[in-house]
Amino acid sequence: MKQVDLSKILEQFKGLWVALTETDTVISANKSAKKAYEEAKKKGYKEPILFKVPTRDLPHIG
């Protein structure tokens, strides 16, 4: 599995749910996961990947 740089997404979409394509392109973003998913489906994406962007960039160990 390749490593992905999501730093631009972290800055631009803090605190929101984003729907991503398989190539990590943002399709939609919303405070509600359901709405972000529905917006992506309306745009024709069958299986968007949902990701909750944290409000702060914290280190993750594990």
Image (cartoon, rainbow, N blue to C red):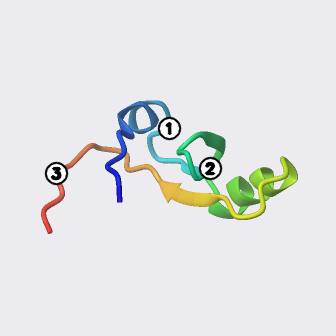
Q: Is residue 31 left or right of residue 62?
A: right
- Report the amino acid beneath label 1: Phe
Identify which residue, 48 or 36, lies in the foreground: 48
Q: Earlier in the sequence, mark 1 or mark 2?
A: 1
- Residue drawn at (40%, 31%), measured in percent from left and top? 11
Residue 51 at what x, y percent from top left? Answer: 50, 57
- Residue drawn at (38%, 50%), measured in percent from left and top? 54
Residue that lies at the very extreme toward the bottom in this rendered image: 62
Q: Quadrant of the N terminus?
A: bottom left
Identify the residue position indicated by label 2 in the image.
21
- Report the amino acid beneath label 2: Thr
Identify the residue position indicated by label 3 in the image.
59
- Residue drawn at (39%, 40%), measured in percent from left and top? 6
Q: Quadrant of the C terminus?
A: bottom left
Identify the residue position indicated by label 1 in the image.
13
Identify which residue, 57 or 8, lies in the foreground: 8
- Residue drawn at (69%, 53%), measured in percent from left and top? 36
How far apart are labels 3 and 2 at the CA level?
25 Å
Nearer mark to the viewer, of 3 and 2: 2
Residue that lies at the very extreme toward the left in this rendered image: 61
Q: Earlier in the sequence, mark 1 or mark 3?
A: 1
